[in-house]
Image (tube, grey):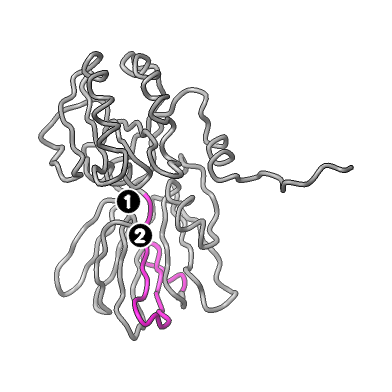
Amino acid sequence: MRIFVLGNGQRRGVPEAANSLLPLLREYCEVVAVDLTQQLDLSRYEAEIALVLGGDGSILRAARQMAYRQIPVLGINLGKLGFLADLGLEEARQYLPRLVCCEFGVTKHLMYECTVEGPRGSRTFLGLNEIVLRTGPPFHLIDIDLAIDGEQVATFSGDGVILSTPVGSTAQSLSAGGPILRQGLQAFVITPFSPHTLTYRPLVDGADRLYTLKIRHCRDGVTLIVDGQDQVAVTLEERIIVRRAPVEFQLIKVHGKSYYQTIRDKLHWGSPPGYRDEP
């Protein structure tokens, strides 16, 4: 089996984890690329699995780094939450023999393409979590038109708008009051970011539709943030088009680690309050 080892080498503990795992990995498989700078062009290599060391941000970066040649990813959590990473470092060491024997499942997840179009031409970004369109300092209100398949849907007034995949629904969209979407759903959720009125609510619609965001009014600069990592200045003359990407993110799921167990264990979703026992 051929494998990538990826991660953010600037993050505490990642280089040490890579150095401790590599001798063991090389006993079981062929390590064709090690990249802790997150800048290697992976299209020049062939592998069956990508091992990603770090937190959810490292996994998002790896998904975008693999671009249109996605392979199954196993996340090893060295961060705080690690929602997409099933295993810790010690668990990964124990799991490795089963991994190389392909004793795992793979779940496929929606990715998106986000294109910024305008007088300056077009730029397209591939992402897994979400895009955020928001105002900048001094943070006056922004008005954003949303159209779906060319039909005007709403004009959001507030700090901005989040358009998220199901994977991203448990990230910034959730913090802004959006719903949790099961990761395998083929849908997007549009969540207003600090809306100015009570009439705005999150909207869920199908991934087969075309979503267009256009700034109607803003006194300050507007920034498009892709997966919390790329920041793009957007002008009033430009529009943002979001569609389903032609590839899917592939996440290795360890047997016995279910989706609802993960959101219970890591987000404490659905947990009752910690009532004291009656005397």
Q: Amino acid at mark 2?
A: Ile
In the rendered image, residue 58, in percent from the top left (x then y), is placed at 31, 44
Q: Residue at x 32, y 51 (%)?
A: 112
Q: Which residues are magenta?
A: 129-154
Q: Residue at x 34, y 86 (%)?
A: 219
In the rendered image, residue 52, in percent from the top left (x then y), is placed at 30, 35
In the rendered image, residue 233, in percent from the top left (x then y), is placed at 24, 71
Q: Tell me if residue 224 comes above or below residue 155 in the rendering.
A: above
**Does the residue at mark 1 contact the one at mark 2 (Cβ under 8 Å)?**
yes
Question: Which SS class for mark 2?
Answer: strand
Residue 131 on the magenta span: yes
Q: CA distance from mark 1 to mark 2?
A: 9 Å
Q: Nearer the viewer, mark 1 or mark 2?
A: 2
Label the magenta part by its dominant secondary structure: strand
Q: Which of the numbered marks, if any, corresponds to residue 206? A: none
In the rendered image, residue 250, in percent from the top left (x then y), is placed at 34, 34
Q: How many marks?
A: 2
Crowding around mark 2 (Cα neighbors within 10 Å: few <14, some 14 to 19, many 20+) is many
Q: Which of the numbered marks, if any, corresponds to residue 131? A: 2
Q: Tell me if residue 212 comes above or below residue 184 in the rendering.
A: below
